[in-house]
Image (cartoon, helix red, strand yellow):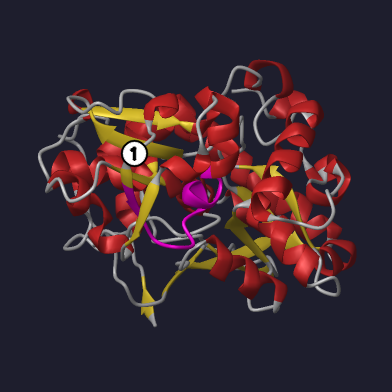
């Protein structure tokens, strides 16, 4: 197991600022592929409660809220000794949280719905939202005939079979008035997805924007101004992004732990939003300098700042929260897309009672 230690100095002082489900995003060598663990420094005079946390993927720039909460001692202030490990996609992290390998984790709460239906004795629930908007996108080249989702008929799209945006394509097609069967899907390994588009071996790809767009731009010379990027949120599926997820039995047994973790994490999120450049610099203190790709992580963070962390409702409901009406609508859409036998209630999917007061969550 590789343990991250703070590096001497920031790797990003000269960098300009550029973040499931369902299926995990394309892996980029920005951190060690081996299992990683980071520990928060704990005051020696205080006995802290250990908490194991899993990311949904590699440790990246968009994990700045976690890194800041560790670096500034927000978790320790809540009496918590937090360690984290990288994830291998939302489906994997959700399964491991349910199995008790982790106390809390990050993942896609819509994928969590599917897990809950299949595993009624291992129920999970989301307790805070990381991304107010989903990174689900379909990407085509700007000079192609496929200029909007309704015109994707006849396109050959590439994605892994379990990719979240791909699985929800029939629902998106219904929303935009397209025939869901008019698209041909090519199965592809995640690491080959972007090259399929760049080399014209596919008309488009479905992916997570924070994974595919930085790779297309920084590695394959396809910046966003040469692409059509169709966010599902803009076309009738107003999905939330990743959330903090916990087992219901752990929640019931350790309410103060969960409440403290959420409070510290949201403090880190507020700091991230207030100064993204400084937030990225904190991330580098925990990252492997030889593997951390500054250009990719800078662009990834910019995408998250522009499209994911905040939404129109955030100024009203604050960070970490959901609009019950919006969540109810998207639960029904995803239940249809995933073929669930029942439609879960909002309360079964998201428990807002562990959020700090709204005044402490305003960006």
Q: Let me know if residue 102 appears in the view.
A: no
Residue 350 placed where, x, y %?
79, 46
Rendered image quadrant of residue 296: top left
Can the viewer see residue 267?
A: yes
Residue 309 in the image: state x and y as whole percent.
Answer: 52, 32
Relative to residue 265, is residue 252 depicted above or below?
below
Query: Considering only vertical position in the picture, is 337 above or below 326?
Result: below
Which residues are drawn in magenta? 157-169
Q: Farthest residue in the bottom direction?
A: 1
Which of the pair 272/226 is nearer the observer?
226
Image quadrant occupied by the N terminus: bottom left
In which quadrant is the C terminus drawn? top right
Taking the image as shown, residue 182 lies to the left or right of residue 302, namely right
Check residue 160 for magenta coloring: yes
Is residue 41 within the magenta segment? no
Q: Which residue is mark 1?
A: 154
SS for tag 1? loop
Quadrant assignment, res 17: top left
Q: In this rendering, would 294 be left or right of 184? A: left
Residue depicted at 51% across the width and 63% down the height: 41
Q: Residue at x 51, y 36 (%)?
A: 179
The image shows residue 98 at horizontal and vertical percentages of 71, 72
Pick whichever, 315 or 219, lies toward us. Answer: 219
Q: Residue at x 66, y 19 (%)?
A: 313
């Amino acid at each position: 197991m590789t343990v991250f230690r703070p590096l001497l100095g920031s790797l990003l002082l000269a960098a300009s600022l550029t973040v499931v489900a369902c299926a995990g995003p394309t892996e980029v060598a920005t951190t060690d592929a081996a299992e990683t663990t980071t520990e928060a420094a704990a005051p020696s005079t205080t006995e802290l409660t250990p908490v194991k946390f899993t990311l949904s993927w590699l440790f990246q720039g968009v994990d700045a809220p976690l890194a800041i909460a560790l670096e500034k001692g927000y978790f320790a202030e809540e009496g918590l000794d937090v360690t984290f490990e990288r994830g291998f996609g939302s489906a994997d992290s959700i399964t491991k949280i349910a199995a008790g390998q982790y106390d809390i984790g990050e993942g896609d709460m819509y994928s969590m719905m599917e897990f809950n239906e299949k595993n009624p004795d291992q129920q999970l629930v989301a307790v805070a939202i990381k991304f107010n908007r989903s990174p689900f996108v379909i990407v085509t080249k700007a000079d192609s005939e496929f200029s909007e989702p309704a015109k994707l008929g006849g396109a050959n799209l590439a994605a892994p079979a379990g990719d979240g945006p791909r699985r929800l394509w029939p629902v998106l097609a219904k929303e935009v008035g397209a025939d869901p069967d008019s698209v041909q899907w090519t199965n592809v390994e995640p690491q080959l997805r972007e090259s399929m588009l760049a080399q014209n071996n596919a008309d488009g790809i479905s992916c997570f924007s924070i994974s595919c767009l930085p790779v297309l731009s920084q590695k394959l010379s396809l910046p966003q101004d040469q692409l059509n990027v169709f966010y599902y949120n803009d076309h009738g599926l107003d999905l939330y992004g990743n959330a903090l997820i916990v087992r219901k039995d752990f929640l019931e047994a350790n309410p103060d732990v969960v409440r403290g973790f959420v409070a510290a994490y949201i403090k880190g999120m507020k700091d991230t939003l207030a100064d993204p450049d400084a937030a990225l610099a904190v991330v580098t203190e925990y990252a492997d300098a030889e593997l951390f790709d500054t250009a990719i992580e800078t662009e990834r963070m910019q995408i998250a700042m522009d499209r994911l962390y905040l939404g129109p409702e955030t100024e009203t409901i604050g960070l970490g929260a959901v609009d019950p009406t919006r969540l109810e609508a998207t639960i029904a859409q995803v239940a249809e897309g995933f073929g669930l036998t029942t439609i879960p209630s909002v309360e079964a999917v998201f428990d807002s009672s562990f959020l700090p007061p709204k005044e402490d969550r305003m960006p």
